[in-house]
Image: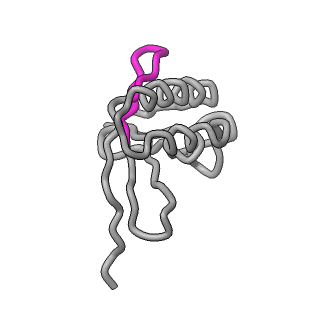
Amino acid sequence: MAQNRDTAEFDVAGVRMTVTLADALSIEAALLARLQQAELEDRDELIQGARDNRPSIETGAVRIGTWILRPDRNRLMLVCRLATGGPGPTYRAEVTREGQTWTVGPVQSGMIHPRAK
């Protein structure tokens, strides 16, 4: 993944994808719309987390509040881990681009468990 302050590049399924700050703003809008429709236990906290900070591209990552955009296998995913001080819920949603339109898929929940020592 290459980046500067205005763009980040990801390799997704063998295709180089460039994400700009303008793209990050569009992804933020799609994420907030998806979260508004979601029936998740932590929905309000996830919405607030997305709104905490304006989208940014720094240190090789596209951040949308507490959400991070990153490649995962052959997909581009938004990932958010709620701060619980221990094992806790994590949320993921696939992000796709069709032309200039960004779409965020259904938000899926999971659990982070500590590694055995």
Q: Residue at x 56, y 47 (%)?
A: 66
Choose top left, top right, bottom left or bottom right for residue 93: top left
* Colour mode of the rendering: one colour
Instruction: Provide residue 112's location: percent of width, then percent of height.
Output: 35, 62
| Residue 116 falls inside the magenta stretch | no
Instruction: Provide residue 110's location: percent of width, then percent of height.
Output: 31, 53
Instruction: Provide residue 71's location: percent of width, then percent of height.
Output: 40, 44
Q: Would residue 57 be found to the left or right of residue 67 on screen?
A: right
| Residue nearest the observer in this picture, 5 or 39 | 39
Q: Main secondary structure of the magenta part?
A: strand
Which residues lie in the magenta part?
92-104
How many numbered markers are drawn?
0
- Image quadrant containing the C terminus: bottom left
| Residue nearest the observer in this picture, 100 or 25 | 25
In the displayed orientation, state which residue is furthest to the bottom.
Answer: 117
- Is residue 62 in view from this perspective? no
Choose top left, top right, bottom left or bottom right for residue 56: top right
Q: Residue at x 45, y 28 (%)?
A: 36
- Is residue 114 in view from this perspective? yes
Q: Residue at x 51, y 60 (%)?
A: 83
In the displayed orientation, state which residue is furthest to the right.
Answer: 5
| Residue 102 falls inside the magenta stretch | yes
Instruction: Provide residue 67's location: percent of width, then percent of height.
Output: 51, 44
